[in-house]
């Protein structure tokens, strides 16, 4: 018989962390890795839009890194036995991607609205989810200081990359950016 997806162990509002400790499903650690999972799903939607490889390949690697990060966040410090392989090199890779894609874009002259092609809009949505994930990871770091601080740096850079990729997606499609104009006040 195949393993069932449901275990019924969470029916009382608790879940298990790596190592077996049970915590409420709204625990700061669960909020952090759960929002990383939500971000990964948003990036899956980006990939479902069949982005050009210059964007899609980057997003695919980010998804793999997010799975590693989620696993790290789901592991309380007392159960961390080995490094996950996730770390400062991944932040450097994000920065290289930002620089490479930004070099292909005109300089920003002001704020732009998150709009344009469906791909760019999906990347902007993922960017907003990424910023929420960043807030959740920061909360976790304040609550449990042993949490890897590189996680905050990674998520911060990732949001920047997603913004740049949204701009790049519009540029590759020949879609201009929509500048933000403040509303007139009476």
Image (tube, helix red, strand yellow):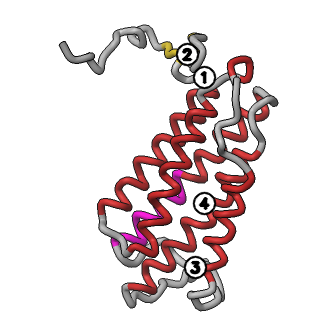
Mark 3–mark 4 Cα distance, whole angstroms, equals 14 Å
Q: Residue at x 78, y 42 (%)?
A: 149
In the rendered image, residue 29, in percent from the top left (x then y), is placed at 63, 28
Give the answer, above or below, for where 6 lies relative to 108. Answer: above
Determine whether the residue tagged by mark 4 lies in a helix, strand or loop: helix
Q: Which residues are magenta?
A: 118-129
In the rendered image, residue 118, in percent from the top left (x then y), is placed at 34, 71
Determine whether the residue tagged by mark 3 lies in a helix, strand or loop: helix
The residue carrying mark 4 is 159
Residue 180, numbered circle: none
The residue carrying mark 1 is 27
44 with respect to 177 (left or right): left
Location of residue 174 by image quarter = bottom left
Instruction: Name which of mark 2 and mark 3 comes first in the sequence.
Output: 2
Location of residue 75 by image quarter = top right
Q: Is residue 119 magenta?
A: yes
In the image, 17 versus 24, the foreground residue is 17
Q: Residue at x 53, y 84 (%)?
A: 179
Residue 24, numbered circle: 2
Quadrant of the rendering where the C terminus is positioned: bottom right
The residue carrying mark 3 is 101
In the image, 5 versus 86, the foreground residue is 86
């Amino acid at each position: 018989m195949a393993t069932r997806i449901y275990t019924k162990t969470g029916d009382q509002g608790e879940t298990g962390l790596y190592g077996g400790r049970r915590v409420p499903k709204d625990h700061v650690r669960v909020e952090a890795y759960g929002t990383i999972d939500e971000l990964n799903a948003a990036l899956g939607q980006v990939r479902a839009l069949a982005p050009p490889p210059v964007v899609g390949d980057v997003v695919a690697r980010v998804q793999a890194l997010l799975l590693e990060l989620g696993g790290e966040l789901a592991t309380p410090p007392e159960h961390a036995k080995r490094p996950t392989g996730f770390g400062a090199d991944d932040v450097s890779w994000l920065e290289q991607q930002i620089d490479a894609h930004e070099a292909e874009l005109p300089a920003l002259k002001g704020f732009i609205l998150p709009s344009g092609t469906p791909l760019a809009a999906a990347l902007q949505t993922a960017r907003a989810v990424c910023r929420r994930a960043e807030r959740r990871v920061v909360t976790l770091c304040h609550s449990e200081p042993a949490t890897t601080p590189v996680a905050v740096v990674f998520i911060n850079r990732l949001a920047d990359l997603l913004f740049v990729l949204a701009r790049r997606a519009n540029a590759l499609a020949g879609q201009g950016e929509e500048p933000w104009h403040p509303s007139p006040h009476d």
